[in-house]
Amino acid sequence: MTKLTQDLITTYAQSDGLALAALVRTGQVSASELVEAAVTIIDRFNPQLNAVVHKLYDMARAAAPEVDRNAPFAGVPYLLKEIGSTWTGAPLTNASAWMRKVVASEDSELVRRIKAAGFLLVGKSNSPEFGWCISTEPKLYGPTLSPWRNDVTSGGSSGGAAAAVAARMVPLADASDGAGSIRVPASCCGIVGLKPSRGRITMSPTGDLWHGCAYILCVARTVRDVAAYLDAVAGGLPGDPYPAAIPQTGWLTSSARVPSRLRVGFSVKPPDGNPIHFEAEAAVRKTAVMLERLGHDVEEHDMALDIATAWPVYTRMTCVQTARLVDELEPLVGAPMAQDDVEPVTWAVVERGRSVSGVQHSADIEAVRILSRAIA
């Protein structure tokens, strides 16, 4: 096993993914050393945070000597969310006791691109069961806490990923978002999160997820890591339902440019009319002032969205999608889902989905697409 110095651990904790890959590329550190640095930090902080639910250290150690040193994220330790993408040989439980024995037998297309980018999988991050919660506290694995305060949530559903990145376990991690599941935990943990535009990321071998409303990308500590990650994994495949052109100039290159004067809108009024915490409002207004000082046009602009109409329709549509997913997973599990196998919310979601008619589901899809256009 590689012997670590405190200087290397400090460098690892203070660097983003691109900086670490540059050290590997120039021979200043090895991919194996980065893996051991990640292992050290995970083992130190995970007992308090519960961000990593499967430690796959041996998998990373075996792959490290073969890493392509010219890859954009050569040798960078990485976490995969416990729902969504499949990595051959890694657990695939969807944070559900019903699936606790399932192991992925193939790589998703996104994971193939992640591997080609040079990442080394050191573990899987915590998530609520099937992603159906805005906090991360599945019955199977227990709650993930914020690295900043142990009495508050890390957010969800990518809460394990966000807590791990904020705690410097890894510089960036897999995350997915259908109703805030990248953006909420990124906000809760003080890191960068980007939900990609429709069609940016192929869902292969799956055809679609929540009719274009859910996508996978990452959470990270720096904007440039997110931009470079998007450069590495973006792009569709023939037959994908929502094609999105790849820009001629890469996102990393574009992110380094000083932007022209922008028109920026912000709101401190949620569409449902509920008040927000004074600390959250203060943070938004502080950011607005900062953007003004940078020369941008900033104005308060509340969202024109009838949430009382939109949310039930969206929820009904996604309940159907979850019920369909459960039916697809039954052959992998080897048994149908029973009520005692899952948490009450998951069972209610699946039962609700199975009760919706095909005509109603079609109408809900159309309504969601019209609502999407209204807020685009």
Image (cartoon, rainbow, N blue to C red):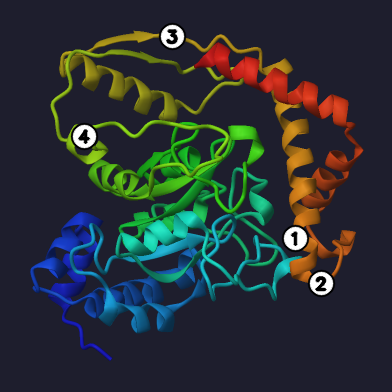
Q: Is residue 131 visible?
A: yes
Gap between marks 4 and 2 measured at Cα: 47 Å
The residue labelled by disc 1 is 329
The label number, if any, that marks residue 334 in the structure image: 2
- Residue 189 at what x, y percent from top left? 41, 47
The first of marks 4 and 2 along the sequence is: 4
- Residue 327 at what x, y percent from top left? 81, 55
Badge 4 element? helix
The first of marks 3 and 2 along the sequence is: 3
The residue labelled by disc 4 is 255
Which is in the foreground here, disc 1 or disc 4? Answer: 1
Quadrant of res 207: top right
Label 2: how many Cα within 10 Å (few below 14, some 14–19, many 20+): few
Which is in the foreground here, disc 3 or disc 1? Answer: 1
The first of marks 3 and 4 along the sequence is: 4
Label 1: how many Cα within 10 Å (few below 14, some 14–19, many 20+): some
Label 3: how many Cα within 10 Å (few below 14, some 14–19, many 20+): few
Q: Which part of the image, by quadrant, shows the N terminus?
A: bottom left
Gap between marks 2 and 1 measured at Cα: 9 Å
Gap between marks 3 and 4 measured at Cα: 25 Å
Gap between marks 3 and 2 measured at Cα: 51 Å
The residue labelled by disc 3 is 301
Amino acid residing under circle 3 = His
Amino acid residing under circle 1 = Leu
